[in-house]
Amino acid sequence: MRTTLILVNYNGRDLLAQSVPAALEAARRAGGHPVMVADDHSSDDSIEFLCRRYPEVRVLALPKVGFGGACNAAVEAAETEAAVLLNNDVVVTPGFLPPLLADLAQPDVFAVGCRFLNPDGSLTNALGNRTAGEWRGGLLHIHHETRLEMLRQTCPQLYANGGGMAFRRDRWLALGGFDPLFCPFYWEDADIGYRAWGRGWRVLFEPASTVYHDQGSTMGRVHKPPHIELMSAKNAVLFTWKNLLDLRLFHRALNAQASWAADDVLIGGLPNRTAALWRAFRQLREARRARAREQRQRIRSDQEIIALSAGGEV
Amino acid sequence: MSERIALLLTFARRGEDGEVERALNHLRGPAAGGPGAHVAALGTPVSEPVLRQLGVEDLILYGGGKGARAAVREARALRPGAAAILYCGPGFAAHLKLEAFALLSGAGKLHLLSPGLPVKTIGRLRLAWSVSVKALATGVHLLVGALICGVAFACLRLSQMLAGGRRVSGA
């Protein structure tokens, strides 16, 4: 299966110096797949650096469209059957690609996620491995597995971390790619994974495909922690509003979210929950449209999605 | 006996060990419980590892199954002479739960600690005022949350009904 390795970049010239050669080597070893960098209007010299040092890399210079928009544009521009999205701070191992492509060859698989390790090879607080979800306290709580013994087998997971995910391009396009509802960042990968399960497809975790991820090295230099927390909380709310179609669970979730606002005074700390609710509310019209679309296309219930993605049966 | 027991109230978690240590030192110092004071802590299951690691053995854990009333009862039973509230900072905003616990614990001396700020000592009346104002603010936040979620629920439910599709939603 021919695939395009897509690195999404914003002002990460120094990160590209590590991630691009690793991607090129992996692509070469797997039989010569194209490598593309989607640049989200960097103000550093990322593009000049790429053109000078790696002329074989296809550079997609975009206007400022955000992470999700850059991913969507790049996948659309790719002309291969499959694509692999990689963050610019993800360094792949030389043999990471073949196991992903083998999994993607299964007929009902939409996406496959890599095994994410910290740059020192540890799993402490590593995100994106064997993700599982649980509806609790008004939101979808996501569990990221960090025990090595639980990461030895290919298995279903809720979603593949957008920092290292392979997928079939036709299915990505059928799902409409990352939803701009989640602009500027976070939760778009969880959303597309959830929707893929809802459509009857599967998302897998592939432990044989290892990548090293320096978490937050891009985000942390572009945005301040309170803003990151606020956007993440806003999108967690929007995720519920869009995707939780089970009315009993939805009613319970919104009750919890209403009282969630009081935690700003009762507890405090990040993020500001009332502000997150308000930000989500300002996107209610888009959320309403997205929910209606989801209602028309869904063939699995929320309970089925959670159970199946955790490897259970329904 | 009562003036020798000092109570620390905190939501601190891993990574905030330095602030917890500062609070413990303050409670053991002359301005609070005094040298040799026995420090107990009221925290959450999240703050438990930090508190234990710093040698606090007398722990009242709130949440994780234990209700507020039981926690307050236990704190009162200790008859603390002083109490310190550790805010996540910056400043002394929010933390209404901890302030209410401190007030209800019956401690005479009340100390407020926030990262990067000098310790503030206040009386019970001042803390009661803060609790009242924050309780009012909680009501406003609840109202805003209820309004947002109520309107959102109505709109989203309607769009779902109109959308048709398969009945996988329990609709």
Image (spheres, coloured by chain):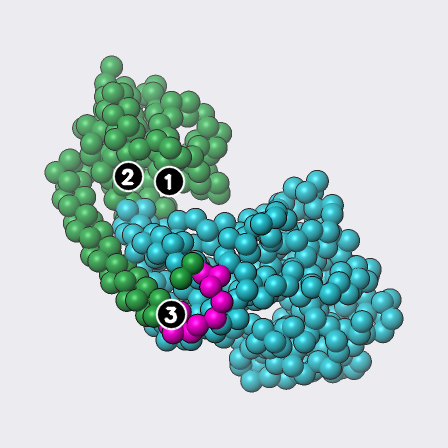
What is the chain letter for disc 2? B
* Mark 2 vs 1: CB contact within 8 A: yes
Q: Position of residue B15 (x, y in %)?
A: 48, 43
Mark 3 sits on what residue?
A: B161
The residue indicated by pointer 1 is: B11
Q: Is residue B161 above or below residue B13?
A: below
Which chain gets the cyan colouring? A
Q: Is residue A249 magenta?
A: no
Left or right side of A277 for B107: left
Instruction: Please indicate whether residue A283 sits to the left or right of residue B107 in the image.
Output: right
Q: What residue do we see at 56% from left, 85% from top?
A: A63
How many C-alpha atoms fall within 10 Å of the one at disc 3: few (<14), some, or many (≥20)? few
- The magenta region covers B159-169
Task: Answer yes or no: is residue A193 visible.
Answer: no
The residue that appears at 66% across and 46% down in the rendered structure is A123
Residue A118 seen in the figure = yes
Amino acid type, residue under disc 2 in the picture: Leu
| Residue nearest the observer in this picture, A269 or A159 | A159
Q: Chain of mark 1?
A: B
Q: CA distance from mark 2 to mark 1?
A: 8 Å
